[in-house]
Image (spheres, grey):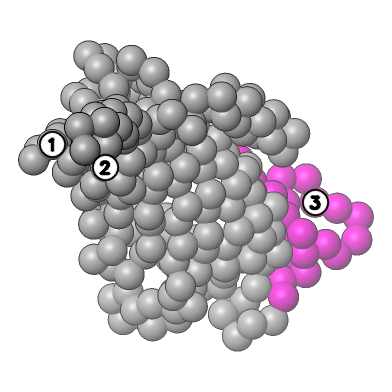
Amino acid sequence: MKKIVYNILLVVAMIAAPTVSQAQIYAKLNALYAVVGVINPQLEFVVGPHSSISIDPMFSPHKTIKWGDRDDIHAMFGILQAEYRFYIKREARGFYVSANAGMQAFDLTRPHPFKNGKLITFEQGFGRGFGVMTGIGIGYTHTFKERWVVDAFFAFDRMWSWYNDYFANGEINLFPRHQKEPKYPDPFNGSAEWLPSKIGVSIGYKIFDPNIKRKSCKERKVERLLK
């Protein structure tokens, strides 16, 4: 599976490379994540009349967080995604659909939605490991004041994870719940599931536009000729 994700990222890079140097570039920051201390900057390269490529790193620096009456929830992770966006009307404006692929590393306490009558509950221990993902998303981009943008988005991915389980006291769990129990103690575990991979509202600014640059060069050339 890691090879599949790697090949997807490689194809995206090969498609984008010839046109990125002449692309409009937007720098964005996910304001929704920033409120809870998760760092999620984005670079979007407009590479065609309806197409763009987005590079989307995400990092949560929180070793532990407080949730309800617990203050031992592990919430440290890093994710890197590459995303292709197809805009319905025109580049970097209006509704779009997307496909993404990425990788992650994490030190997390596993959440359980809608369990025991609660919206979210957490396991007592935590897991440390890595994973890959690929999925689809939707979004909407609104441009204002020529260079500023607001980008609302949601993506849902199939995630494959490999990790070690630990008890709340930090001791490794030699007998985690395997789908097929091994003959000997083995703390290494794995899982695959569909989960939301990102959701947010980003504020962005167009930091480069080759059309504006070419226009400025022509204007400077005319000015030199008139002197």
Q: Give the residue drawn at x 28%, y 76%.
A: 68
Instruction: Give the percent coordinates (x, y) of residue 126.
Output: 57, 69
Q: Main secondary structure of the magenta part?
A: loop
Q: Give the residue drawn at x 46%, y 62%.
A: 59
Q: Nearer the viewer, mark 3 or mark 2?
A: 2
Of mark 1 and mark 3, the one earlier in the sequence is: 1
Residue where numbered disc 1 is placed: 146
Residue found at the very far bottom of the displayed protein: 169
Which amino acid lies under the numbered mark 3 shown in the image of this protein? Glu
Q: CA distance from mark 3 to mark 2?
A: 53 Å
Which amino acid lies under the numbered mark 1 shown in the image of this protein? Glu
Q: Nearer the viewer, mark 1 or mark 3?
A: 1
Determine if residue 172 is in view. yes
- Marks 1 and 2 close (CB-CB < 8 Å): yes
Q: Which mark is residue 181?
A: 3
The residue closer to the viewer here, 188 or 141, is 141
Neighbour class for label 2 at 10 Å: few (<14), some, many (≥20)? some
Q: Which mark is residue 206?
A: 2
The residue closer to the viewer here, 204 or 70, is 204
Instruction: Give the percent coordinates (x, y) of residue 1.
Output: 71, 34
Q: CA distance from mark 1 to mark 3?
A: 59 Å
Q: Quadrant of the C terminus?
A: top left
Q: Is residue 198 above or below residue 7?
A: below
Magenta residues span: 172-194
